[in-house]
Structure formats: structure tokens, C-alpha cells
Image (spheres, rainbow, N blue to C red):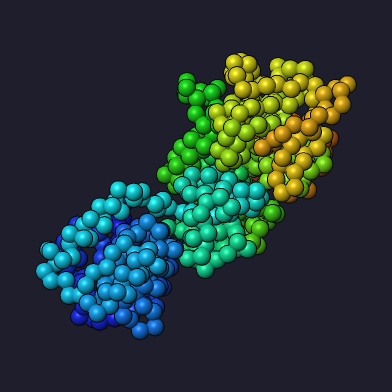
Amino acid sequence: MKKPLILTVDDDPQVLAALAHDLRQEFRHDYRIMSVDSGPAALTALDELRARAEPLALVLADQRMPDVEGVEVLSHARELFPEAKRVLLTAYADTTAAIKAINTAELDYYLLKPWNPPEQLLYPTLRDLLARWQATYRPAFAGLRLIGFQWSPRSHALKDFLSGYLVGYQWLDFEKDAEAATLLLASGLGPDDLPAVIYPDGQAVARPSKSELARHLGLLVEAQHELYDVVVIGAGPAGLAAAVYGASEGLKTLVIEKETPGGQAGSSSRIENYLGFPTGLSGTELTHRAWTQATRLGAEFMAPSEVVALEVQDGYKVLTLCDHAIIRTKAVVLATGVSYRTLQAPGLDRLSGAGVYYGAARTEARSCLNQPVFIIGGGNSAGQAAMYLSTYASRVFVVIRAESLAAGMSQYLIDQIGQAPNIELLPNTQLREACGAQALEAVVLQRDGQPPVPYPARALFIFIGAKPSTEWISHLAICDSRGYLLTGRDLVADPRYSTSWKETREPYLLETCVPGLFAAGDGRAGAMARVASAVGEGSMAIKFVHQYLDE
């Protein structure tokens, strides 16, 4: 933890040096001493300290300075650091002005120059002021800070990104947190620059992109080699498993993820049926463990980055990224998973990210405190979200078109939902409209055979099934009618197999119609939508990569 600061300001070098010496003599063990030799420099220093969130305990400023007087410096300090103690240094002839300044500028004290001996004329007063400051001082957050509007989709996207990479940050709502406006002012930014990120070193960036954030956080944004043995596209459970096994078995392995690691499983608040964790674990925890394991074994991670095209040249796979970078590899594992399907109803598109969320959106859970929330969907993801949100929301309504949850949800979740006192199931019901001007205020629901009814709502979380993220590769690899990648025996049984597969052998179990291009996880036709099966397929894919490379 940083020591708090004592700032001294005087345009007389001898006085400034003597003051700094005396302060260090008495307070150096508990405070840092910072000296500034002019009023304008002091104003600049205060702005910089505020931007870096430095703890400022005390300001001592000489009154008679050219350009900017001491009272002006202390008034500026009060605006930026209202809790800091402010002392005016003055000569005997200026005591009247100093006393007046105590009332007009709300100073805490004034000291006469010279202050010899300091043991009698300086230290007792400052000790008392610093003790009063320490009594109310609470160390400021020392990490990254994100300032934005609660109902801003861009703010929501950045919160999700930071949470997905387990980056600790402080969220400041510009409309509610007084500190947000102060930090923006000190950083030279305004409301039009939001969302804004202030890094621990004080650097402020307006409306940063995810790539800019990733670069500053030290994430890999460029490939480190010209050629890889295997590139894994997607960092869900299947992709992470492929990365672990590929790297551990000596393959030069690169993982490319366009969002955050973990996929849909990473957003699960609690996974209770994963082997070896009897008390369950969160998707974030599982993802972090796998990510750490893969990188320790030597796998490289590029994120956020998206593969937009794949070509085959002389047997090598050539990947084109969204920034036009080119990566070459001998084999590819497609672990792109699935994305949530969008629901069509008036108001949903307009309020997406402002109260309407696809997926768990765990970063918004605390903002639902003591408010009603609605969940659309009856699968395991919806059930896990309902249980998680029930610890914050006043009521959680689970809206499903079916009569019960039995068809799509695991029994352990059904039992937990039935025992939760603030979760209510609304069967045979559909969403008709999402209402609100700047943010979600209400949802309109209709039960079969009954008229639509509006309900107050703080948030709406939608889980209505998924679609494979294969649009970009469907021209090259054969997919079924729903867009899932065909592999192995399923591919052989397809009428298009004979015209697309030109090898003398049959495709391996997880191999697509392109030799050396494998699919694992939820985006593969016939895959089970379970974390354990995705992990198994990811590890199996590396076995087939070895066989392919040995050919």
C-alpha cells in the first residue's frame, strides 16, 4: 500500500528545503513528502495526484507566491481532495489575511514563518491534523477504474471483458458516484468521453476498444511465431483442453479467442456436475485454472482476436485475422462453440446492454439488488443464472413456453429452484415487449389464452438456445442443416462427402472434410452440450492432430 502524501508549496527555495527537511525528519516513516516550487506547478501536481488516485493527507502552501497564491492552491486541493488537511504558511504581517482565509477557503490551520523550533511550533499542530485525517481515511482502490453510465451497452461490454479476464477493477457510475466526475475532471475528460478507463499509473483513455485494453493489460495481441503445429480457434472448455494437451505434448500451440475465455460455460455462476468438484465451481474459476495450466505448459493465447478467413495452401492452413494479420499452421482445431440466439420482440434490440442481456451477465448482478428480474429460457444456463441472481434480486421470474422445466433442465437445478423462496416459474408464457426509454423498465408477458400483462423489471436475461458460430467457415467445411460441423462418420454418411474428401483414408473421428481441420465442442454436429464432453473432445482432437502430422 502506498504511503499517503504531504505536499509542500513555496517559491522560496531555502524555505521549501527547510520545510521538506523538517517534515521528513518527523513523518518520513508514515508519509511521503513532495515539494513544489510554485503555485502553477502545485495546481498541476494536484491534478496529477488526483488522476493517479494518490492518497493526499496534508497540503502546506505559502500564501505570498507570484501568479497563484497559497489560498488558491489550497482551494483547488479542497475541490480534488476534500478530506485532505490544508495549512497556509504565512508571515506575521499577513495573519489577518490568513485568519480570513480560514473562513472563506475553509482552511484547517495557518502557521507562521519561521517555525523554529519545529518540535514546538510545527510538529504538534501537524500531528493533530494528520491524526484527524487518519481517523477517516480509507485507502483508495489502487487498480484499474472504469467510469461510465450504468445503462450504456459499451460500458457493459467493457465490464464483461474485464471480468472475463479476471481483471480486478472499480466500476464508477458517472450519474451516481461523485468520485467519477472528480476523476474525469482531473484526467481532462468529460461525459462525452465515456466509458473511460483510468489505469493504475494514472493514464486515462476515453472509449477504449477491447484490443486497446488487452494490449495495456499485457494480453498477447500478435502471434509470436510464423508457423504453428496447431492453432485452436476458441477458448471454451474444448479449446482450453486442446491447448493443455497440445502444449503438454510438445506441439507449438496457439489459441485465438475473439471474446473472453470460457465460452458459455465461463459465464456459469456454478457448475455442480463436473467430475472431481463435489461442491461445484464457477465457470470463471474453471476457465482460469485451465487457462493458467495451458500457458504454464507453453501454449500462446491471442485475445481478443477473431479469425475471419481460413484457406489451405500446400497442406498448410492460412488464417486471416480481423486486423488482416496472417497466421500459418499445420493443423487447426475449431472450438468456436455456439452463441445465444436472439429473441424477436419490440424493444429488445434497442435496450440490449441497457437492461436486456443475452447470457448470464454476472457483472450486472449487483445492480439488480432488491429489484425484480426476469429470465427467459428453461435450460441449465437459465437455471444457473436464476439461482445466482436470486441472491441479489428481490424476485426472479423464470419465463418458459413449456408446462414445466423437466424437458430442458437438470433435476438438481429444478430442485434448487423449487426450494428458492424468491424464484417464481411462469409456465406457458411468452415475452411480448420490453419497455423503457433509456433502460429497461418493464416487460410485457402473455400467458396462453390470457391478455398481455406488464411487469416492472430491472433486468431481462435471455437463454433461448444457441446457434453454432460457423458462418465464416461453412463455405469450406461441410455443415448440417443447422450449421453444425460434420466430422468423422457423420461426414462419411453425408451425400457431399464423396465430392469433398479426396484422401485415401477416412476422416478421423473429429476431422472435418478438410484434412487437418478438426472440430470439437458444441459447434460440432452430434456433440453433447456438457462441459465434460467438450473437455474430452478437445483432448481427443490433439490425438488426431498427432496422427495427421505423422502422415
The residue at 70%/54% (across/down) is 309
Res 471 seen here: no
In this rendering, would 365 be left or right of 504? Answer: left
Q: Name the residue nearer the viewer: 259 or 489.
A: 259
376 or 114: which is nearer to us? 114
> Where residue 122 sits in the image (x, y, percent)?
18, 65
How many tags in the picture? 0
> Is residue 514 shown left or right of residue 84?
right
At 80% from the left edge and 37% from the top edge, which residue is drawn? 433
Q: Residue at x 72, y 30 (%)?
A: 376
The image shows residue 15 at horizontal and vertical percentages of 21, 78
Residue 128 is situated, as x and y percent measured from the top left of the image, at 23, 55
Q: Residue at 54% of width from left, 34% of height from top?
A: 283
Left or right of 66? Residue 189 is right
Q: Residue 72, how many percent across, how many down?
A: 40, 73
Question: In the rendered view, does 365 fall on the left or right side of 103?
Answer: right
Residue 459 vertical position relative to residue 148 in the rendered view, above or below: above
Q: Which corner quadrant of the image does residue 373 belong to? A: top right
Quadrant of the snapshot with the C terminus: top right
Of residues 176 and 451, the one nearer the viewer is 176
Q: Can you name the residue that lies furthest to the bottom here? A: 66
549, 404: nearer the viewer: 404
The answer to whether residue 100 is visible is yes
